[in-house]
Amino acid sequence: MKSRSIIIGLVALLTNGCNSDSNTNISPLLGIWVTESCAQSSDSNGIPVNVWVKSLYEFTTYGTIRLGREEYTDSNCVTSSDVVAPAEAQIPITYTDQGQVLLQEGIAGGDLLIEMGEGAQFLSVEAFYTINNGSMCFSDAFTFEATTFGISQSGTDAIDFNNCLTMP
């Protein structure tokens, strides 16, 4: 079976568009979550700049994931300099919380379907998440990092406790 994955740099994703879908989704995912990690940003040529970022991921009530970032002047991401509010991505990203399950780790979690792209670039991946003490962690099929978001059909269902988001 051919393995496919999509990894996206957040800078290329951000637009100022909006989505008018009316998909009502009652889920513990709802709201804005921020990466625990802080990473140095790069310019359009991939050259590091003196800006560090944490990414914002908004799980909306209409089933989309909106992307944003908070910029910092220091490598510890303490002194904030700018916030780019979550906006729709250039490549559509949708999610469906498919309900609560008992995860293989023996803890409560949720079954999550994320779909991204269109046409030949469309990818749909189902995996898991868990929320505990204000942190939301995902199976390694999903990547929620400071400068990158991605999904991969070759990831496992095991929760990666180093791949977590927190409430701001």
Image: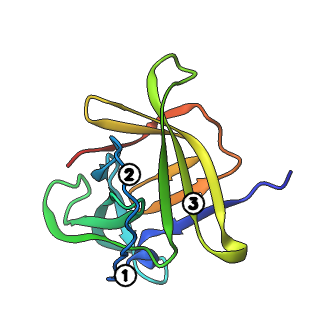
- Residue tagged by mark 3? 115
**Image position of 6 (left or right of 17):** right
Which residue: 28% across, 71% down? Answer: 50
Where residue 47 appears, as percent x and y from the top left, is: 44, 77
Judge whether 103 appears above or below 2 on screen: above
Give the foreground label among 1 and 2.
2
Residue type, label 2? Asn
**Judging from the image, what secondary structure is the residue with disc 2 in?**
loop
Pointer 1 residue: 15
**Picture residue at 69% right of the left edge, 76% below the top:** 119
Question: Is residue 130 at all visible to an observer of this figure?
Answer: yes
Q: Residue at x 65, y 44 (%)?
A: 155
Counting residues from the start of the chain, the first of labels 1 and 2 encountered is: 1
Any mark on residue 103, and which? none
Left or right, 147 with reference to 151: left
N-terminal label among 3 and 2: 2
Q: Which residue is mark 2?
A: 25
